[in-house]
Amino acid sequence: MPTKGELPSPDILETFPNPYPKRDYSNKMICEEFTSVCPKTLQPDFGRLSIRYNARDLCVELKSLKLYLQQYRNHGAFYEKLTNDILRDLVNLLTPHWMHIKAEFSSRGGIHSVIEVSYTSSEDDPPELESLESDEDESE
Amino acid sequence: MPTKGELPSPDILETFPNPYPKRDYSNKMICEEFTSVCPKTLQPDFGRLSIRYNARDLCVELKSLKLYLQQYRNHGAFYEKLTNDILRDLVNLLTPHWMHIKAEFSSRGGIHSVIEVSYTSSEDDPPELESLESDEDESE
Amino acid sequence: MPTKGELPSPDILETFPNPYPKRDYSNKMICEEFTSVCPKTLQPDFGRLSIRYNARDLCVELKSLKLYLQQYRNHGAFYEKLTNDILRDLVNLLTPHWMHIKAEFSSRGGIHSVIEVSYTSSEDDPPELESLESDEDESE
Amino acid sequence: MPTKGELPSPDILETFPNPYPKRDYSNKMICEEFTSVCPKTLQPDFGRLSIRYNARDLCVELKSLKLYLQQYRNHGAFYEKLTNDILRDLVNLLTPHWMHIKAEFSSRGGIHSVIEVSYTSSEDDPPELESLESDEDESE
Amino acid sequence: MPTKGELPSPDILETFPNPYPKRDYSNKMICEEFTSVCPKTLQPDFGRLSIRYNARDLCVELKSLKLYLQQYRNHGAFYEKLTNDILRDLVNLLTPHWMHIKAEFSSRGGIHSVIEVSYTSSEDDPPELESLESDEDESE
Amino acid sequence: MPTKGELPSPDILETFPNPYPKRDYSNKMICEEFTSVCPKTLQPDFGRLSIRYNARDLCVELKSLKLYLQQYRNHGAFYEKLTNDILRDLVNLLTPHWMHIKAEFSSRGGIHSVIEVSYTSSEDDPPELESLESDEDESE
Amino acid sequence: MPTKGELPSPDILETFPNPYPKRDYSNKMICEEFTSVCPKTLQPDFGRLSIRYNARDLCVELKSLKLYLQQYRNHGAFYEKLTNDILRDLVNLLTPHWMHIKAEFSSRGGIHSVIEVSYTSSEDDPPELESLESDEDESE
Amino acid sequence: MPTKGELPSPDILETFPNPYPKRDYSNKMICEEFTSVCPKTLQPDFGRLSIRYNARDLCVELKSLKLYLQQYRNHGAFYEKLTNDILRDLVNLLTPHWMHIKAEFSSRGGIHSVIEVSYTSSEDDPPELESLESDEDESE
Amino acid sequence: MPTKGELPSPDILETFPNPYPKRDYSNKMICEEFTSVCPKTLQPDFGRLSIRYNARDLCVELKSLKLYLQQYRNHGAFYEKLTNDILRDLVNLLTPHWMHIKAEFSSRGGIHSVIEVSYTSSEDDPPELESLESDEDESE
Amino acid sequence: MPTKGELPSPDILETFPNPYPKRDYSNKMICEEFTSVCPKTLQPDFGRLSIRYNARDLCVELKSLKLYLQQYRNHGAFYEKLTNDILRDLVNLLTPHWMHIKAEFSSRGGIHSVIEVSYTSSEDDPPELESLESDEDESE
């Protein structure tokens, strides 16, 4: 059974220098094979994650992203929380100009869910990343 | 035969705290298996409901949403009324930043219908929820 | 052969009170089975009509809409004229906040046509419906 | 072999009066069966033409449009030139409020091309149609 | 093994005069058969390139574009770099009003990537093309 | 209202000689725009007819087939009867080696119907066409 | 809660004489809007029923079929049983040459089910319909 | 106007030796861009040709096949005749074990046509190719 | 890391009596959310399992099937072995008339795999189930 | 330029023991990313390879198959030859009960090709693999 202590860790993520930091471009990485565990029923959930960002100085290395997302395989979390957790980890890692994550989960009881979350910064005004920490942590 | 007294009740809906209340994100829940009854012909209607919202402090729990929508199974109501009723119940429950509902009904006599309704609020100016009550109730 | 006297009549259309007149929502009705007659060749034309509107006080009843559209079955009219005629009849009936009609006709000689027309009003400034009358009537 | 003298002529195009000149609506005509000849290789090219416009006083008659487009069957021209030529001919004929042409050509050597061109006018400020003449004519 | 010296060269690209330089139109060229080599694993990558631009005085000749893109067949580069390199080469060649490139790469380890980059200029303010040179060159 | 006397007549059908009577080949003609009238409700029905046959000495001319099928536009008949009637008329006309008709009708009350009927002959043993006459005629 | 006494009854089904009893043809009726109740969880199930048969003397009337299938709306039965029950009722009613039913049920817990059952007879050897009675009745 | 003398000639077709004559395999060549002219209306027809064969000693060279099929561009022939003509020319050229041609033509007046023709031989019993000559030639 | 001792166990599977054991019908259960682990790379694999069978006396209960398949989530096995293992477990459980399993695995390195395996029995000659035991067990 | 000496070698292929050699099952491996070089034009070709076989004692290891197919990346061969070459190499390696290869190549000049080849053996009568050697080798 997944426990709180087994939180996916962003330490596994790696970066490489943005080859064109002065150019305005976006990078979308689509993971068709995301799976996690429902914290209530302990049943597996399946989904599709689209992560799009505009790199500042760093790009995320694809293989390390794959390994990071695999950490959720036996981790129990609500859709709303894990989508925001992933955004938080990647924004902390990359401090991009902006990032958007869309998480589509497969049907449960005839209903499927799609969570979308955005982060936006400006070059001159870097984000206060503290505000990206999980708000839930305090309310718990 | 469905009667007025058998109205679907929002009391069955449950919530949980929004894990990231300071983050701007949306949650879309798509129910492919909605069915109700035509109040004129008493024949069953079938549809697909998309409910998208930006949570303030509360999120709706998915299983309770499923049970709430199942209450319409033997309930007779026009498309226009039931789509707005569902919006009213969920806005009253969640007081979200905004909510959008799209209800697509299957073909009857070669014509199918799509109802779309939106509710928008602002954090500083919470909606007067009275205005969301069914206007029809008075006109009847 | 279709003649001018056999014009489809809006008298067959019926309405019911908008259950949520204070709410901002739209209603799209899609008729996959529209057919009329080409006034030049007297050959049948086939199409798909999407009628979307934002109701003010009245909604159009679906069965009466079906019967209204069936009147075009043996009626001869150019695509441009009949699409606008249907808009005129429905705006006159409903005085909606706005209405949009999209009419897609099947291929003739390797070319198919799509007509789109919009009507917009404002609550404080109801449309002068005379301007919706067929402009062609005068020019003929 | 196609020669310069065999230019498609707009003289074959016919019009009819716009039945609703005071109404704001669009007309899209999609030709799935466009074919021309590559001026370099003399090999046939195939494409799909979408012509959309907002009529002022005149509409183009569909059968004459079909015959006009068939004139390109054995005519040699680059995609960029023929798409703009067709826009020029139709704008000269109809003086519409606006017109948009999208020409999608099938794959050659693993690459296919899509040309899109727009013309916009205003009722009070009719376009100087001279500026629509092929700029290429002078540069040649 | 691909080496730095084997860089794809834009010298192979050819142009022809824009037949309608005064007209505002776009040209999209879609290459379904792009392939390059991963610089880390030396495994082949496959993708789909969409290049859209608004020509100023010059258009790129399609066959030369095909040969230019084939130079990447045995060239090793990260997605982020090669997409930007292609933009740089084509902007240097054409000095278009604007250009947009979308590069979709096939799945690796369950994740596929989409890179999108835009260049915009204005007629009166031609771009300082130096800023389009690879920023990476300096950082290396 | 459609009456018995207005039966579609096969007299409108025309033939031309099979250009390859010694070759074994099939010809499928697909009419996407078939419409008739329900004899019970007098409401229009819509469908898609696929007629496939192996010609002996005669082929059916396409334009005459179109006009023949248009005769059903205001004719009232059950799906089962009209599909078999069309088979009877075309077999009587062509005496093909074999013929197969598939008629797909659009949804009514959530149910759509597909009727398929086959006729097979042999060159040496031509069919007794009397057996193809409507069996219903006697039972009425 | 559905109880055993509320069994769907075939008495609601109506027939009409096969208009072409000597012809070999099939009739497929596809109901996209089938719904029943899971006897274990009492949760609604949704599915798509395809019923295809070769009529002997009788055809089933479509509207009565629709009403018959609606009886399953609040009836609790396993997929395997209700699909076979429907076959039994329709074979008893029509004694067709053959009948095939395919029932596709929507996903539950990531698994969806498709039940297919066939009945075949011969004109000279009518089926012993007793063998079509539910075998389950005895085992219960 | 196309005349009889302008018949497409198989002389343009080229072959190369089958690299695996002892192996049983098939080769399908699909031409999405076939066009010819209707001999009655002189209007262009468009279609999609699938040619599949099992080579004996010779394979058809693809570029020469393309040029052969382009000869039909301005040639007037009925679908039934030209499909069989192409089979005849290719069987005469290749004497394959078998060949199958499927020709799908785009919609005219709401009806589109699909012609399919097969040729079969056996290694020990080569076909009498005379029987493949157009039967029409004699009847004309 | 998955070890040999953690083999998925068929003990979790449950059955219920076939409601129509004398009827010939099939039951297909499609699991879109199968996942296991590659025994070489320890990377997760994803797939879609279709299990179709003709029940003799027993049917497999759907929820227990779901839990049985979830046991492969952290189990390492080659596609060829696990597909055959699942067939063995289900045939041992149900002794069906026949069973077919199709397992489609997602792409790895640009290649995806589809394993299909069938088991057939006859009522009078029940299968020697020993032959269904993994042959691999001996060779290891 | 590809030369004869650079022939793809089957030596790179690896096998593992069939885990269920007594079971009758098939394995399909689909490579979406096959590319080779046209021996005439030296232009790259792109395709999709489906390899399906029924293993006897050996299965092909997926990664080695990927590397084997990558050897064709800069190899020049006609579609007919390379498809048969791959069959020959894999049959020599695996001596399967049967193997089927389908190779779909992308469009060149508006024509795309699909090659299909089968090999069948029997357990008691192993194939004389010599007959699988390229017949072309002698004729050259």
Image (spheres, coloured by chain):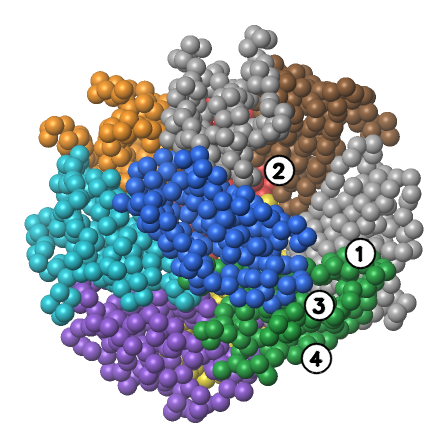
Chain colours: B green, C blue, E brown, F cyan, G purple, H orange, I yellow, J red
The image shows residue H38 at horizontal and vertical percentages of 28, 30
Q: Are marks 3 and 2 on the same chain?
A: no
Q: Can residue H111 be spotted in the picture?
A: no
Tag 4 and tag 2 share a subunit: no
Q: CA distance from mark 4 to mark 1?
A: 28 Å
Task: Please give the residue where the numbered disc 2 appears in the rendered image.
Answer: E47
The vertical placement of B2 against I80, above or below, is: below
Q: Is residue E33 above or below residue G111?
A: above
Question: Disc 1 residue type?
Answer: Asp
Percent position (x, y) of residue I135?
A: 52, 66
Q: CA distance from mark 2 to mark 1?
A: 33 Å
Quadrant holding the N terminus of chain C: top left
Does dot 4 land on a helix, a strand or a loop?
helix
Element type at mark 2: strand
Identify which residue is drawn at 43% across, 80% down.
G71
Look at mark 3 in the image and give the residue it sits on.
B132
In the picture of the structure, the residue carrying the numbered disc 1 is B24
Q: Give the chain letter at badge 4.
A: B
Q: Are marks 3 and 1 on the same chain?
A: yes
Q: Nearer the viewer, residue I106 or B37?
A: B37
Query: How would you rate the neighbour count of disc 2 (Cα within 10 Å): few for under 14, some for 14-19, many for 20 or more?
Result: many
* Mark toward the viewer: 4 or 1: 4
Task: Measure the alpha-carbon separation of dots 4 and 2.
Answer: 52 Å
Real-space CA distance between mark 3 and mark 2, rounded to the nearest whole angstrom? 50 Å
What's the chain of the residue with tag 1?
A: B
